[in-house]
C-alpha cells in the first residue's frame, strides 16, 4: 500500500520534476492518552527506487486525532485514506 503522485520541481526535494513519486508510511505511533496518531511518510523517486533500496528523496510527518480517521480496515489503511484528503495529495492515486 502506497500513494503515487507527480511532484513539481519545487516540491520534489531534489530540484527536478517527478512524474510518479512513491509515498509510503514508514512508522506510526498511537498516543492513547491524547487519542492522537503521529506518523511519518517517505517519498521515493518512484516505486523502482524504493524497491532497489535507494534513499528517500524527502519525508514528512503528520499528527491526526482518532476522530479525523474514517473508513474501514486497520490503522494503516485509515492513515492512507486520511492522506488522500489532504490538498498536497489531491492528484494522488493509491498503488
Image: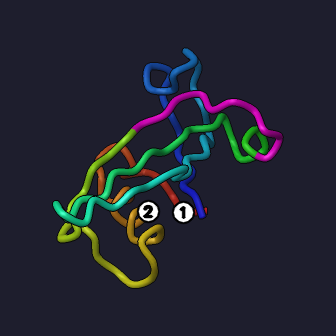
Q: Are marks 1 and 2 in contact (CB under 8 Å)?
A: yes
Q: Residue at x 54, y 40 (%)?
A: 42
Image position, residue 93 (x, y; %): 52, 59
Image position, residue 86 (x, y; %): 30, 52
Residue closer to the observer: 46 or 90: 46
Q: Which residue is mark 2?
A: 80
**In the shown orientation, is residue 24 left or right of residue 84?**
right
Label 1 or label 2, whichever lies nearer to me, is 2
Quarter holding the C terminus? bottom right
Quarter-of-image position of residue 71? bottom left
Q: Residue at x 55, y 50 (%)?
A: 26
Image position, residue 35 (x, y; %): 20, 65
Instruction: Please say whether residue 28 is one of the residues in the magenta stretch.
Output: no
* Above or below 22: residue 58: above
For the magenta stretch, what is the residue range? 51-60
Q: Residue at x 44, y 19 (%)?
A: 10
For marks 1 and 2, the one nearer the N-term is 2
* Above or below 51: residue 1: below
Crowd class of label 1 (few under 14; some 14 to 19; many from 20; radius 10 Å):
few
Kindly state the secondary structure of the residue where label 1 is placed.
Answer: strand
Q: Residue at x 72, y 43 (%)?
A: 50
Between the residue at mark 1 and the residue at mark 2, the CA separation in whole angstroms equals 8 Å
Q: Which residue is mark 1?
A: 94
Quarter holding the N terminus? bottom right
Image position, residue 32 (x, y; %): 25, 66
Instruction: Please say whether residue 58 is one of the residues in the magenta stretch.
Output: yes
Assign the magenta stretch its main secondary structure. Answer: loop
Kindly state the secondary structure of the residue where label 2 is placed.
Answer: helix
Q: Which mark is residue 51?
A: none
**In the shown orientation, is residue 65 left or right of residue 42?**
left
Q: Residue furthest top?
A: 15
Amino acid at each position: 500500500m502506497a500513494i503515487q503522485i507527480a511532484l513539481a520541481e519545487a516540491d520534489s526535494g531534489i530540484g527536478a520534476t517527478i512524474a510518479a513519486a512513491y509515498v509510503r508510511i514508514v512508522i506510526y505511533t498511537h498516543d492513547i492518552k491524547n487519542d492522537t496518531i503521529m506518523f511519518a511518510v517517505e517519498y521515493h523517486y518512484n516505486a523502482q527506487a524504493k524497491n532497489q533500496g535507494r534513499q528517500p528523496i524527502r519525508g514528512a510527518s503528520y499528527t491526526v486525532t482518532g476522530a479525523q480517521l474514517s473508513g474501514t480496515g486497520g490503522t494503516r489503511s485509515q492513515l492512507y485514506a486520511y492522506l488522500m484528503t489532504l490538498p498536497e495529495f489531491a492528484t494522488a492515486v493509491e498503488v
